[in-house]
Image: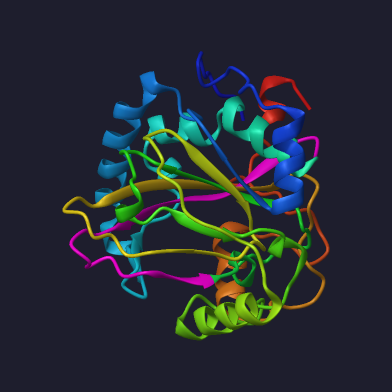
Amino acid sequence: MVVNIQAPLAEDYPLTQADIAQYQKDGHILLKKVVPPSEIDELRTVVLQAHQALIDEEEDFQKAFRCTQNLWEVNNVVRLHVLSRRYAGIAAKLLGCRDVRVYHDLTFFKDGQGRGAPTPWHQDGYYWPLDTNKCITLWVPLIDCPLEMGPMSFVSGSHLTRNAEHLEISNASDEFINDMIEKENLTVTPARHMNAGDATFHSCWTYHAAKSNTTDTMRIAFAIAYFDADATIPLHPPTNERRAKNLARWFPRAVPGGPAATEINPAVLAMYGSN
């Protein structure tokens, strides 16, 4: 697969060694202006269009957010962002791997006026059918996202645990993780105001949550999930129904013990001759 991506999406983001160290210690980081300001308006427009094109597949998670997935398969502008050297380069450096593959992209629309309920504490790893710890999600609001709109909070250092792996996103996961936060005195990094184009990166094992959206405006956020390009499919069968479905959907024809690499999981940096 070859892509023709021009600046600024083909330019490296000025990530520092301090940024990398912070991510590897905490399991999350907020970075400014990850989406170049010149690209935000167009990306927001096409994400809204692609979400609408996939509306029949929309999922509503606990009334907390609405999402559609793999917009890059139906919109060429989204495709340029998902396959950009800029974003994949950040992900690879934070994870400490030579390259990353695309898991999938998705929208996170949280309705306003309190209709978008709080997002429960959870670990994304419940859903990931991969045999690797090197998995990461870029989450970016495409409009300014004040605290009242529901940006994410994280439990720093929780990416080193699997304590909530058995729980899907739910009231049960929220109660379980809240209980651990209190009993174990875990460090919660509260949500921060994010401008359009700022992005958080978090491990699939980092506990995270978000408050309800009490503004009058829908929170328009977009995410891209990446993983180590050398990851494999687990030898053992998926441990829950959602992992089984995700294995079939995001890794078609992949085999247990084999590479997690199909036509919809391209290794991004290899497209640019940079590994």
Q: How many labels does the image show?
A: 0
- Quarter-of-image position of residue 211: bottom left
Q: Is residue 32 above or below residue 191?
A: above
Name the quadrant of the C terminus: top right
Q: In this view, does 262 lie above or below 196?
A: below
Of residue 230 and residue 12, the one placed in the foreground of this image is 12
Q: In this view, does 66 lie above or below 244?
A: above
Residue lying at 18% horizontally and 62% vertically, measured from the top left: 113
* Furthest residue in direction top, as rendered: 7
Name the quadrant of the N terminus: top right
Q: Could you tell me residue 182's position as x and y percent?
A: 61, 79
Residue lying at 52% horizontally and 21% vertically, measured from the top left: 9
Q: Can residue 90 be seen in this view?
A: yes
Q: Could you tell me residue 73's position as x and y percent?
A: 44, 43
Q: Does the magenta stretch include residue 242?
A: no
Q: Could you tell me residue 177's position as x and y percent?
A: 59, 78
Q: Could you tell me residue 193's position as x and y percent?
A: 40, 44
Residue lying at 58% horizontally and 58% vertically, measured from the top left: 250
Of residue 121 and residue 95, the one placed in the foreground of this image is 121
Residue lying at 70% horizontally and 45% vertically, measured from the top left: 23
Question: Horizontally, is 203 left or right of 95 in the view?
Answer: left
Q: State which region is magenta.
A: 97-121
Question: Horizontally, is 93 left or right of 7 in the view?
Answer: right
Q: Is residue 268 visible?
A: no
- Quarter-of-image position of residue 88: top right
